[in-house]
Image (spheres, grey):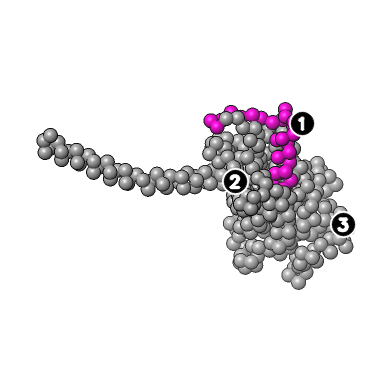
Amino acid sequence: MSSATKEQDRFTEITSSMTSTASSPTTERHPLVLKTIEAGKQLLCGGVAGAVAKTVTAPLSRLTILFQVHSMVTTKDRPNFSAGIGQGLRKIVERGGILSLWKGNATSVLHRFPFSAINFAVYESALDAMHNNRQEKGQHQDPSPLVRFAAGATAGTVACIGCYPLDLVRTRLTTELPGREHYRGIGDAFKKITRAEGILGLYSGLGATLFVAVPNFAISYTVYGTLKEHVLEDELFYNLRQVVHTENGKRTKMGFYLTLMCGAASGGLATLATFPFDTVRRRMQIQNLHIPQDQRQTSYQQITSVIRKEGILGLYRGLTPELLKVIPMVGTMFFVYEFMKDTLDINRQNGNVHKRFTTKN
């Protein structure tokens, strides 16, 4: 063999070695990069699902808020915004046109997108951490209701605190009366609230909100997860389940109607348990706008004041449109969530998430 050939072979060997060495770290990093991409997809799914669901149910959401705070902002001796849901919706349209049903919805979407994204992501992380800890102790495989409750409470707390200023601005924009608007938009609202009330003004009513968010999401996730396990195992619901063929074999998941029923049950129970606190938090959020400083009340004072003036049912004003909102909202949210996961191909590569919310292998 000639010296030229030997040199060529040696050069090829060195080059191959360098290429192998250079590609090794990339190969090692690839699972981490893939995991990051999947996490981003997961956040996107939760955010889009929450935003779409919120937009679909925005008219009922606005009507609920107006029922809750009407006795604070009205100049007449009428504690009720209207005698019924239909009359209330007509009243909103007559005052501001059909688009006024979605007044404040841009802020709602800006709030709901990160709120839902953070909520789902934190719930997943918290549930994984708690569930893995239980598995290490040799306890049963499926997450218990207590674990789901704790994970849901954690998710609700983190998402609520992180996105609260947008929630407060949304409430104030939603409750403005036609011809008596204080803010010209989202940016103007942030500017004026900060200038008049300071940074802490953006967190007015946070305590009452946490009293709503923490038990609400804890109950909702617990009920939904428990019902999901039941309907995917009970033959009574066989015709409402779907079988999906994947590269890893068959996978059973809930159909749209099962998702709707489980979501409606979880959302309804959570709403019934926390609605009085929701009424108080809405009133806390807007009192700085409508009530003189020396007449503003704490959460406890709000509760006692409502009960004294309007009775215990005063804490439940707006409950009917809220319950009517829960069913389509939760159903839409999980339906869009499923659709987004299928579209972004998350189910196949992120089986734990899919199983936790929608499947049973």
Answer with the quarter of the image where residue 44 lies. top right
Task: Report the Cα–Cα distance between label 1 and label 2.
Answer: 33 Å
Q: Amino acid at mark 3?
A: Ile
Q: Residue at x 60, y 45 (%)?
A: 46
Q: Do we see residue 80 in this rendering?
A: yes
Q: Position of residue 124 (x, y in %)?
A: 61, 48
Q: Secondary structure at mark 3?
A: helix
Q: Secondary structure at mark 2?
A: helix
Disc 2 target residue: 47
Callout 2 environment at 10 Å: few (<14), some (14 to 19), or many (20+)?
Answer: many
Q: Is residue 185 left or right of residue 97?
A: left
Q: Secondary structure at mark 1?
A: helix
Q: Earlier in the sequence, mark 1 or mark 2?
A: 2
Q: Position of residue 28 (x, y in %)?
A: 41, 46
Query: From the viewer's perspective, is the residue at label 1 or at label 3 nearer?
Result: 1
Q: Residue at x 62, y 63 (%)?
A: 192
Magenta range is 220-248
Disc 1 target residue: 236
Q: Is residue 136 left or right of residue 282?
A: left
Disc 3 target residue: 312
Asked if residue 174 is among those painted magenta in the image, a careful observer would answer no
Q: Nearer the viewer, residue 27 or 190?
A: 27
Q: Position of residue 93 (x, y in %)?
A: 74, 43
